Image (cartoon, rainbow, N blue to C red):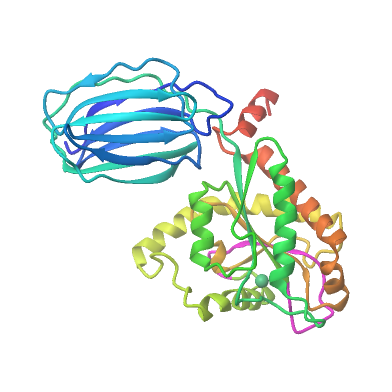
Amino acid sequence: MQTLLLLVLAVVMAGSAQASAKLYGFRMVQQENVMLHFDLDSSSATADLFMLSRPHRLVIDLPGATLATQMPSETFSQGVVQAIRYAQHGSEYLRVVLDLRRAVKPSYRFVPRQGGQRLLVDLGVKGNPSIGSANHQASQQTPLRDAVVVIDAGHGGQDPGALGQRKTREKDITLAVALKLHERLQAQTGIRSVLVRDSDVYVALRQRMNTARQAGADLFVSIHADAVERNEARGSSVYTLSIDGASSEAADLLAKSENESAALYGDIELDGMDNGLRQTILSLAQSSTMELSMEAGSDVLTELKTIGSVHKPTVEQAGFAVLKSPDVPSILVETAFISNREEEQKLKSAAYQDKLAEAMHRGITRYLQRRAPEGTHLAAQRRKRGS
Ligand SMILES: [Zn+2]
């Protein structure tokens, strides 16, 4: 009996060239606190909140959101909220005004959700579950969204990664390839690409994973360039997370060095991973995304084979900390061996970086065309094709 819906309104927004967000759902919930939910189809929507007094009002401005249909004002006979009204200010912003019976101290945050994000406004006032009325519900049609790829350029900042014999730094190669891949993915309809870093900065492992989750990633791609003692080792490799640990000794060594920077900068403990129960839950989630990770890895490896030698013919598994994202299919691409003189030279050339980015682009696209989840443009196209 804790959750009581006081008010549910669906707001249909008009498409506008200027609009950066569409508000397609609103509800007010009497939980522990009185909460307002605004569902937006943009992952970059913003909100401005401020209080006015005499009489007390909370104003919520949603820049770039436009209101198409006239929404009726609603009044409430009890509770802190007396009324709700809407005002459309051209295509610049949508203003939602709550008339209040007393002053409140609202807080708000955005949480990612399918197809965009939800603005949660906490009025900071205890909810009253006995208040129940005005339950409006319109069918909500969640707009189709782009499939999201998060590209993680390995290392960066004070963590240079591996060094080549001619002192080429892994962090520079990974960034260059990441930027080229990003450019190609961005140009593609139905795919949105997000970079974990676009400059020479250190990003903690946990933050890399958080970026993926916050962006609502459908695929996480971490880019690296191997270094091993045997300097004749060559070729690309693709890894996914192994729950049981590394599938080969080399992968084990590699995982160790990739994880070393995490240990170095105090980020080895992943969110909640020290708790036994949580670990079990995470493992279960991981196993369900493992299969997708393997598929994505295989598609990328197939394409890498077309541009040069591969180190191992199949996708390998290793316990990279960066891949331990339980709900996001993730792969780690070792583009080539930076420790191999010849490959170091290739990695430095823009032409070879282009080839790598193109191959990864083809592999990622092929994977997403087959596996992008329902609700994406790519999944809709797939259904249309009847495959
Ligand atoms: Zn690396």
**Nearer to the camera, 265 or 95:** 95
Instruction: Give the residues in magenta.
Output: 226-245
Where is 151 relative to 166, above or below?
A: above
What residue do we see at 36% from left, 29% from top?
Answer: 95
Q: Is residue 236 magenta?
A: yes
Residue 227 in the image: x percent, y percent? 73, 77
- Which secondary structure type mostly characterizes the magenta part of the structure? loop
Q: Can residue 325 be seen here?
A: no
What residue do we see at 74% from left, 67% from top?
Answer: 173
Name the outermost residue toward the front: 54
- Horizontally, is 332 left or right of 163 in the view? left
Name the quadrant where ligand 1 sits. Answer: bottom right
**Nearer to the camera, 176 or 64:** 64
- Horizontally, is 35 left or right of 287 in the view? left
Residue 54 in the image: x percent, y percent? 16, 33
Q: Is residue 256 magenta?
A: no
